[in-house]
Amino acid sequence: MGYTGFTLVMPFLPLFIGQLGVTDVGGIAMWTGLSLGVTPALTALLAPAWGRLGDRYGRKIMVERSLVSFVVLMAAMAYVTRAWHVLALRAIQGLFAGYGSLSVAMAAESAPRDRMPQAIGLVQTAQRIGPGVGPVIGGVLAGVVGLRRAFIATALFYGIGLVIVHMMYDDRATHAQPADAPETGRVTFRSVLAFQNFILMMGVIFGLQFVDRSFGPVLPLYVEQMGVTHERVAIVSGVLFSIMACAGALGHHFCGRLLKRHTSRVVIGGGAAVAALGCGMFGGSGNLWVMGVASVLLGLGIGAAMTASYSAAGAVIPPGAHGAGFGVLTSASLVGMASSPFIAGFLGGTSIRVVFFVDLSMMAMLALAVRRRMVDAGSGPIA
C-alpha cells in the first residue's frame, strides 16, 4: 500500500510545482529534481540506523513510526503554497523513512530459512506492482478531484498500510531469536560488512538498481529518436516501462523456485547476464518489438538477481541483526537509485545508446564478479 500511495502523486509532481507559482520550465525541473532526490538521499544515510533501532526495539514499531510520519506529511502536502514547502516536507520524509528495508527484514525473519527467498520475493513483487498501478490511479484522481486532494488519497493509502501492519503483523512471534540461536553480541556496521559475501551483494544491489533506474531519463527520448511521433512517445514509453515492471515482478516471484534448483551464485550471475542481453538489445536495435523483448529480459533478469542478492545476504545475517543488515543493503540500493538518473542524463546528452552499452558493461561485470568472487553458503542451493 505504501509504494502504491507514493506513486499516486510523485509522477505528477512537476505539474504540482507549476501550480505553486513556478512558471519557468527550468525552475520546475530544478524544484522537482531536488524534491524527488532529497528523500532517497537522506533515507540512504539513515536506513542502517533505523534498522539497528528495529533490531533493538522491534521492527513493527519502527515501520509504524515511519508510516505515521508519511500519513501526516503526505496530508500536509495538500496545503503547501510554495515550492520550497514541498522540498522541506520531502526532506522530513527522508528523515523518517525506512519502512522499505524494515519490511524486507520482517519478511526475511517471519519465514523459515528455506522459505526466505519466497518471502523476500513476495515483498519485492509488491514493491514492483505498486508503482505500476499507482500512477494510473493517481492520474484518474488528479483529473477528478485535483492534485491537492490526490495527496490526501495518498495519505489514506499509507493509513491503510499502517492499519494492516498494526493488526496483522505479530512482532512477538518473529522478532525474538530462536532458543538455540548463537549469541550475536553487539552488532556494529563493521561487523555487518564482515558477513560472508555481504560487500559483494551491496555492490550487486547497487549495480542492479543503477541499471534499472537509468532508463527513466532516456527511454522516452530514445523512443522518439526511433521515429515514434511525439504524440505517441508517452504511451509507447509507458508500455515499455510497464513491461519492465511486470517482468521484474515475475522475476522477484519466481526467484524462490530458481533458488531451490540452483545456487545463489548461479541465479544472481544468470540474472545479471540476462539483463546485460536486454541492455544490448536496447542499444543495438531501434525496433519497437525488439525493445519489447528487451524490456522482458531486463525486468526478469534484474528482478530475479535482486531477490537472490537480498536472500543470499539474509542467509548470512544473524537473526538479531536483520534490521541493520537490510538497512545497509537498502542504502546501497538508494544510492544507485539517486545517482543513476543524474549519470544517465549526463551520458544521454552525448548519446542515448551509450547509456545502454554502459548498462550492458555493468551487468556483464557484475555477472563475472559474482561468478568469480561469490562463495556459496553450504556449497549448494537452498533446500
Image: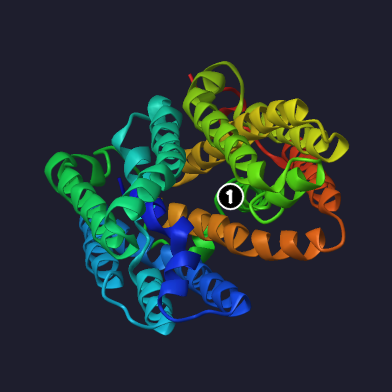
Residue 23 in sight: yes
Q: What kind of element bears circle 1?
A: helix
Please tell me which residue lies in front, 14 or 19. 19
Q: Position of residue 158 (x, y in %)?
A: 25, 54
Residue 57 lies, with reference to residue 176, above or below; the image says: below
- Return the residue at label 1: 198
Residue 72: name its quadrant.
bottom left
Q: Position of residue 347 (x, y in %)?
A: 81, 61
Q: Residue at x 18, y 43 (%)?
A: 164
Q: Identify the colour scheme used.
A: rainbow
Q: Residue at x 43, y 63 (%)?
A: 47
Please tell me which residue lies in front, 122 or 35. 35
Please tell me which residue lies in front, 259 or 273. 273
Q: Residue at x 33, y 81 (%)?
A: 81
Residue 112: name its quadrant.
top left
In the rendered view of the protein, which quadrant contains the N terminus?
top left
Residue 56 in sight: no
Q: Position of residue 53 (x, y in %)?
A: 31, 64
Residue 17: name its quadrant.
bottom left
Q: Amino acid at mark 1?
A: Phe
Badge 1: how crowded within 10 Å, few (<14), some, or many (20+)? Answer: many
Please tell me which residue lies in front, 183 or 317. 317
Q: Position of residue 282 (x, y in %)?
A: 79, 37
